[in-house]
Amino acid sequence: MEYKLFYALGSAAQGVRVILEEIGAPYELVQSTIDMSKPRPPAQLAINPNGWVPVLLWGDTGMYECAAITMFLCDRHPAAGLAPRFDEPERGRYLQTLVYFSNSVQNAFQLNYYPDRFANTPADEPSAQRRGIRRLRETWKVIDDQIGDGEWILGERFSAADVYLFMLTTWLNTSRGQPSTDEFPNVKRIAEAVMRRPSVQLVYAEWIAANT
Ligand SMILES: N[C@@H](CCC(=O)N[C@@H](CS)C(=O)NCC(=O)O)C(=O)O
């Protein structure tokens, strides 16, 4: 196996798995968890002491951070055509969007799902959660406006950024007060198009069965 991916359903590791499927690289899933009460595999913690997935191993090394892994895999397998090359005009928007997803949209999710990481006392956590919901609306609106009437995030060209977008939309949970993609029609259009890809149908089979 070329890659090992520490994996849990509902996590950002699913997005990395879609990228591996799109690339066609051989990989093995190593079952991990996002349950805070359960232990992480020692080999995962050796690479990522934070205890988060995804963690990707290859050869005798490894890395974490979903956006970084996505960029790494796309650059390592350019024949898959999932990322603009260094000298192509869409390269800037591709990098910008992945980093914005990672440090702004994901941060908004974390405020709502993991308020203890942001609030100093338990009493402050509901405030952090509410700010997370507002921040989700703000950041998804930025992405929706950026997409405009483009077919994909980069315009005419599908890329790993669209996979990332789909992954993030699966985390939206209206029962927690978070917005739905109905508020962001351009995001919704791309998420629906990404969902039709065979790689996504495979990796997200359970989510698709439960949510569509
Ligand atoms: N910035 C990291 C965040 C990773 C992250 O938060 N992973 C979540 C699942 S999506 C997780 O492992 N949560 C369990 C935990 O925090 O212990 C990335 O993008 O890879």
Image (cartoon, grey):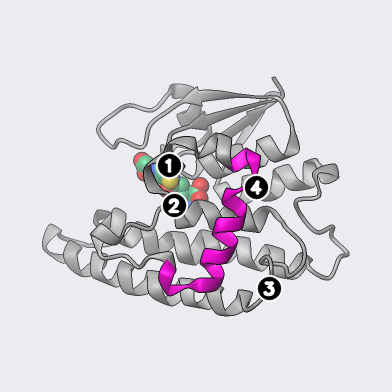
- Mark 1 residue type: Trp
> Mark 2–mark 4 contact, CB under 8 Å?
no
Along the polypeptide, which appears first: circle 4 or circle 3? 4
Q: What secondary structure predominates along the stretch shown in magenta?
A: helix
In the displayed structure image, the side of residue 24 where residue 169 appears, left or right: left
Instruction: List x then y, in percent, for residue 1.
Output: 69, 19
Along the polypeptide, which appears first: circle 1 or circle 4? 4
Residue annotated with mark 1: 207
Residue 187 sits in quarter: bottom right
Rounded to the nearest angstrom, the CA distance separating label 2 from label 3 is 21 Å
Rounded to the nearest angstrom, the CA distance separating label 2 from label 4 is 18 Å
Q: Which mark is residue 70?
A: 4
Residue 188 painted magenta = yes
What residue is shown at x 25% (from left), y 32% (from top)? Answer: 37
Taking depth in this image into account, of 207 and 123 the one nearest to the observer is 207
- Mark 4 residue type: Thr
> Mark 4–mark 3 contact, CB under 8 Å?
no
Judge the density around disc 4: few (<14), some (14-19), many (≥20) Cα neighbours within 10 Å.
many
What residue is shown at x 11% (from left), y 63% (from top)? Answer: 123
Rounded to the nearest angstrom, the CA distance separating label 3 from label 1 is 26 Å
From the viewer's perspective, is the residue at label 4 or at label 3 nearer?
3
Rounded to the nearest angstrom, the CA distance separating label 1 from label 4 is 21 Å
What residue is shown at x 24% (from left), y 58% (from top)? Answer: 175
Residue 30 painted magenta = no
Q: Which mark is residue 77?
A: none
Q: Which mark is residue 150?
A: 3
Q: Magenta segment, which residues? A: 182-200
